[in-house]
Image (tube, rainbow, N blue to C red):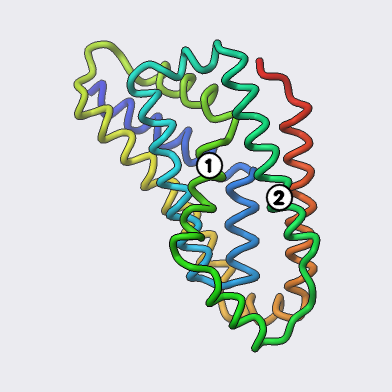
Amino acid sequence: MEFLYAFFTVTVVHLLAAASPGPDFVMVTQQSISQGRRAGLLVSLGIALGLSVHILYSSFGLAAIVSENSSILEWMKYLAVGFLAYLGIRGLMSKPSNSKVENKSVKKQSGARLIAMGFVCNAINPKAPLYFVSLFTLVLSPQMPGYQIFLLGVWMMIVQLLWFSTVTLVLSNPVIQKRFKAISHWVDRVMGSLLLVLSIRVLLTGSK
């Protein structure tokens, strides 16, 4: 019964957290619209894999340490700001291109690079330690077996992947793609602006 409660709680809370606007959502949206389904799905996979970092230290009780250590959070914040700002500037520099150039640009994005982009975007999120320590404190107990904690962690990654894969499939629909094709560079610029705003917001947000 305890595991079922934890499973239900994790599913609801994490799905709501994944659906909320943030760097992960912006990145998946940008890649899905500008480069297509393959890019969006691979970035989504990277984001889901990035959760493993937070799940591991949360499972071993390190989230509480990280959440109380201001210097660690400060370094994570600066890493996140730099990464988001880099992606934002790239988006703002996007230029109009024809279909041939677009196809070439898609080929240049290797699968490993797209997965790495999603992984890094999620792994260095400075708000993640506070979120995960709150969630794990809510559902975990000293009596819960290790394998159940492992299963909950894997399920969180699956929920994350399913949500962003759904977002990708919707945004990479041929009809939507056709409509956005002529304005893809403006989509990149808008998403780049959002990433820059997010980076500034993270920079101005206190560690506690």
Residue in the foreground of this view, choosing between 24 and 4: 24
Q: Earlier in the sequence, mark 1 or mark 2?
A: 2
Label 1 element class: helix
Tell me the amino acid under the disc marked 1: Asn
Say which residue appears at 46% left-offset and 20% top-offset.
Answer: 133
Question: Vertical placement of 179 versus 93: above or below?
Answer: below
Question: Vertical placement of 84 versus 72: above or below?
Answer: below
Residue under label 1, please give it. Answer: 122
Say which residue appears at 42% left-offset and 52% top-offset.
Answer: 161
Say which residue appears at 65% left-offset and 22% top-offset.
Answer: 74
Q: Quadrant of residue 182?
A: bottom right
Label 2 element class: helix
Is residue 8 shown left or right of residue 35?
Answer: left
Residue under label 2, please give it. Answer: 86
Front disc: 1 or 2: 2
Tell me the amino acid under the disc marked 2: Tyr
- Callout 1 environment at 10 Å: few (<14), some (14 to 19), or many (20+)? many
Is residue 91 shown left or right of residue 19?
Answer: right
Residue in the foreground of this view, choosing between 202 and 29: 202
